[in-house]
Amino acid sequence: MSLRHDFPGVGDWHYLDSAATAQKPNAVIDAIARAYGPDYATVHRGVYERSANMTLAYEAARRKVAGFIGAQSDSEIVYVRGATEGINLVAQCWAGTQLKAGDRILLSTLEHHSNIVPWQIVAEKIGAHIDVVPLTADGQIDLDAMRAMITPQHRMVALAHVSNVLGSVLDCRRAADIAHMVGAKILIDGCQAVPRLAVDVQALDCDFYVFSGHKLYGPTGIGVLWGRKELLDAMPPYQGGGSMIDKVTFEKTTYAPAPTRFEAGTPHIVGVVGLSAAIDYVQGVGLDAIHAHECAMVAKARAAIEQINSVRVFGPDNSAGILSFEVEGVHPHDVGTILDETGVAIRAGHHCAQPLMRHLGVEATARASFGIYSDDSDVDALVKGIERVRKIFG
Ligand code: PMP
């Protein structure tokens, strides 16, 4: 599978930072150019044909997103800026209104900061508490520990679907069953899952699911919150403004039904068009093929890296598209800088997962992450680069 020619941002370097943000295919770039060019107009307000057409495209994209993740209805799809905003929206509008002092929220050790901090903000306001499910040795959430620690006071469980550091795929379906056993809701952070796994929110049996467009080969500034209709319907607005209302008077304002209620202001129209093109592109390649391709890349890289003296790989053997590692005695930033000199772009740092770094006993890791366009040349360059690091640092 070589799709490099579809991606002008990939070119002749070795881009191994797709978990941070993915490069964009021409199909997405062209769709964005058209949407900002000859097709450009606002949505939902215009009485003229081009605006009506843009509104049709905007709402057709909502149906496409719904189909992409197995939502029952497009009215369950809320456009947000990204996963971060989706989680903040649920934290404020669901947890912020449903939880009371003494209630508890359950997270896991491997969460991205965006699936920790929004819950802390709301918990502090309400007097709720946060508990943390530990991990197993292979980077899974410890479901036995989760079962043992969950109580009826737990009202919300929030977990990543795929770890952005370890690449482990969490068993979210079993976590959902455990959450529902005590009547808790479960939110899944699907940022690293939607670009590489076929996702079905019904099969996962979750209550909320969020992801960002830019990791799915789409534009920045657009993401998706999926929520069960009855939950969204019962939630108050996130922000006030134009478009989200039913009727406004100075005495009282009533709100539009979900999802419009949560989409105040002129939305990211072009972002939605780009996201729609990204979904078409990914579905054209097929998520099963993408997943298999990335697993093969990771397996090849892992096998080669583990042959290099004093290199430690984090995460399970079957990690999805993401490979974190440490070259012992060398700071990951130095690893990243030396790799950059050889045209290999990786990420080095805590990956917005400081509690996980503490759990792993490191300050930071080096992370190579693969995408739809990665190929053997990227793996070879990565391995060669790490060998060079080892040589330079002895
Ligand atoms: N969760 C995970 C697992 C992530 O990898 C990221 C992005 N690194 C986020 C949440 C946040 O996504 P965004 O910055 O696009 O809102």
Image (cartoon, grey):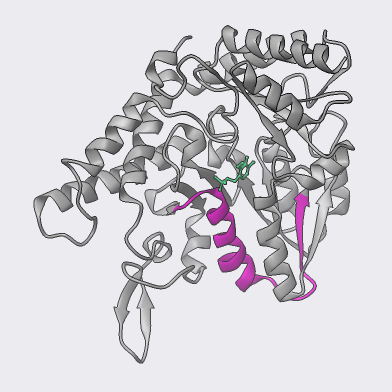
Q: How many numbered badges does the structure rendering display?
A: 0
Q: Residue furthest bottom?
A: 251
Pick the front one: 11 or 313: 11
Q: Considering depth in this image, is 162 or 3 the residue closer to the camera? A: 3
In the figure, is residue 118 to the left or right of 28?
A: right
Residue 91, magenta (yes or no):
yes
Q: Quadrant of residue 171?
A: top right
* Residue 337 place in picture, x, y as percent: 69, 26
Query: Is residue 122 shown above or below 39?
Result: below
| Image coordinates for residue 11, horizontal then vertical, percent | 45, 17
Residue 163 lies in quadrant? top right
Residue at the image position 59 percent from the left and 55 percent from the top: 87
Is residue 115 shown left or right of residue 304?
left
**x, y percentage for residue 75?**
39, 54
Residue at left offset 59%, top offset 36%: 20
Which quarter holds ligand 1? top right
Let me know if residue 133 appears in the view.
yes
Task: Give left or right: position of 168 versus 31.
Answer: right
Query: Which residue lies at the image location 75% right of the left edge and 48% below the top edge?
Result: 178
Q: Residue at x 74, y 24 (%)?
A: 335
Picture quarter with the C terminus:
top right
Q: Is residue 17 magenta?
A: no
Residue 137, compared with residue 206, is above or below; it is above
Does residue 67 appear left or right of residue 389 in this picture? left
Q: Which residues are magenta?
A: 80-107
* Residue furthest to the left: 48
Q: Position of residue 342 (x, y in %)?
A: 63, 15
Question: Could you tell me if residue 296 is visible in this image?
Answer: no
**In the picture, residue 173 is in which quadrant?**
top right
